[in-house]
């Protein structure tokens, strides 16, 4: 019987055969489709010229965020990038889990609670020089604003000494929003099959000598929020009512 959830095997997805098929699929199908749908604009690629591995930490509004972000990456970086995907959404059915691993080189994570086993797997892969894509909000935003980050990215970066790349994906929710997004901002309007989208990579972050994991996590969240404010022009992006007190 096939194991599911956190027990679904993913090591084969990092093997030569899967990587070869994935590269062909991205080169000749996904990348052309995404660029045609979104007229994708990419900024900040100079921030990916340093040493890897990188932990990409991004806002999350749409199920299209992952193909958009991976398309924005240089192929050399994308080929060494693993996606942390929600166990309860992508790894509870055998064929869906298989496709998720094959196409996105994904590993399952428990987004509802701290799970030492999934955290350890992610840590070992980063230490083995795989880049990792995380959505620290824990799911798609319910209102389009940046939600409070969970602490996994800061923990993994502190333990592995990997660089964190704050990443902001702009207006992906408008692309077929009724199917892929959650926030009413995107789902109530007419579904758009084409819409301009941008992906911006910020300056790399690393833990400072006098900084604990909680403070580092706050700095990561604020870096993504600041990218969002700059790109979107919305001075309130990433701010919550409690921030005023």
Image (spheres, rainbow, N blue to C red):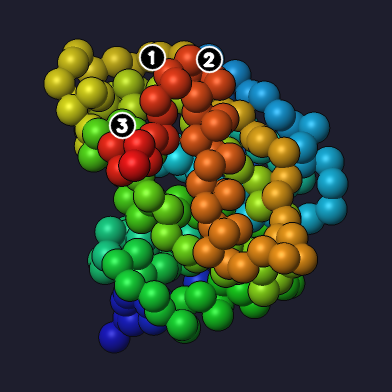
Q: In the image, what residue occupies the spot 39% across and 25% down?
A: 236
Q: Position of residue 23 (x, y in %)?
A: 64, 46
How far is the residue under mark 3 from the one under mark 1?
19 Å
Which label sits on residue 194?
1
Q: Is residue 72 left or right of residue 239?
A: right
Q: Quadrant of the C terminus?
A: top left
Q: What is the residue that sits farthest to the front in this orientation? A: 245
Closer-to-camera residue (204/122): 204
Q: In the image, what residue occupies the spot 47% across and 83% down?
A: 117
Is there any visible trace of residue 29 in the rendered image? no
Rendered position, 110 above or below 223: below
Which residue position holds label 2? 39
Q: In the image, what residue occupies the spot 53% across and 42% down?
A: 222
Per the image, label 3 sits on a secondary structure element best described as loop
Question: Is the C-beta separation of discs 3 and 1 under 8 Å?
Answer: no
Question: Is the C-beta separation of discs 2 and 1 under 8 Å?
Answer: yes
Q: Is residue 221 left or right of residue 63?
A: right
Which residue position holds label 3? 144
Q: In the image, what residue occupies the spot 23% across and 18% down?
A: 191
């Amino acid at each position: 019987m096939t194991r599911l959830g956190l027990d679904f095997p993913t090591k084969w997805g990092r093997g030569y055969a899967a990587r070869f098929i994935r590269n062909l699929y991205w080169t000749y199908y996904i990348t052309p489709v995404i660029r045609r749908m979104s007229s994708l604009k990419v900024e900040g690629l100079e921030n990916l010229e340093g040493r890897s591995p990188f932990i990409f930490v991004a806002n999350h509004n749409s199920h299209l965020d992952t193909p958009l972000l991976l398309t924005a990456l240089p192929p050399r970086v994308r080929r060494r990038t693993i996606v942390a995907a929600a166990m309860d959404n992508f790894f509870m059915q055998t064929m869906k889990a298989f496709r998720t691993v094959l196409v996105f080189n994904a590993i399952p994570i428990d987004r509802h609670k701290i799970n030492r086993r999934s955290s350890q797997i992610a840590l070992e892969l980063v230490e083995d020089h795989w880049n990792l894509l995380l959505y620290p909000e824990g799911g798609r935003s319910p209102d389009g604003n940046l939600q409070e980050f969970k602490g996994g990215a800061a923990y993994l970066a502190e333990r592995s000494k990997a660089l964190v790349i704050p990443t902001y994906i702009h207006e992906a929710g408008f692309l077929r929003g009724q199917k892929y997004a959650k926030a009413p901002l995107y789902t109530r309007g007419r579904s758009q099959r084409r819409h301009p989208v941008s992906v911006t990579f910020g300056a790399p972050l690393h833990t400072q000598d006098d900084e604990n994991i909680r403070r580092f996590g706050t700095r990561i969240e604020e870096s993504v929020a600041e990218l969002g404010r700059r790109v979107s022009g919305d001075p309130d992006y990433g701010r919550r009512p409690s921030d005023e007190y």
